[in-house]
Image (cartoon, rainbow, N blue to C red):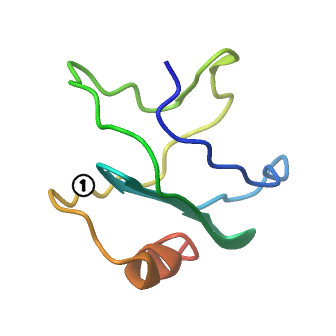
Amino acid sequence: TTQAALSFSGVNANSDAPMAVAYKANNFAFSSSIGAVATDSSGIVPEVSRLEVGYYSGSGWINGHIKRLIYIPKRIPNSWLAQLGRRV
């Protein structure tokens, strides 16, 4: 079930593509080096039993590498998210 609708313009092949995601109930956001922070202010946070890093729902596993993963156990402000999404 889709909980939030966040869109972005995609990534270029053979290039770094930093991305950052943050969420809490009714407060979802996504940022990348490509554009502004995308937000959705409606949605619940489902119970999560696993995290699949490098998997794109519906398309399968990415064809690349995860350079760095940072986990922050609280919802950070969108301004921080924008900075994280632009770092390589």
Horizontal side, residue 15 vs residue 72: left or right: right
**Does residue 73 show up?**
yes
Q: Residue sitting at 84 percent across and 46 percent down? A: 13
Identify the amino acid type marked 1: Tyr
* Residue 28, x across and y down, in percent: 44, 54
Between residues 80 and 86, which one lies in front from this camera angle?
80
Between residues 68 and 5, which one lies in front from this camera angle?
5
- Residue lying furthest front: 42
Residue 60 in the image: above or below residue 62: above
Q: Residue sitting at 74 percent across and 54 percent down? A: 8
Between residues 29 and 9, which one lies in front from this camera angle?
29
Q: Which residue is mark 1?
A: 71
* Residue 30, x across and y down, in percent: 54, 58
**Does residue 19 show up?**
no
Q: Residue sitting at 53 percent across and 26 percent down? A: 2
Q: Residues within 10 Å of mark 1 (few under 14, many from 20)?
A: few
Horizontal side, residue 19 vs residue 44: left or right: right
Q: Residue sitting at 53 percent across and 69 percent down? A: 85
Q: Quadrant of the C terminus?
A: bottom right
* Residue 70, x across and y down, in percent: 30, 58
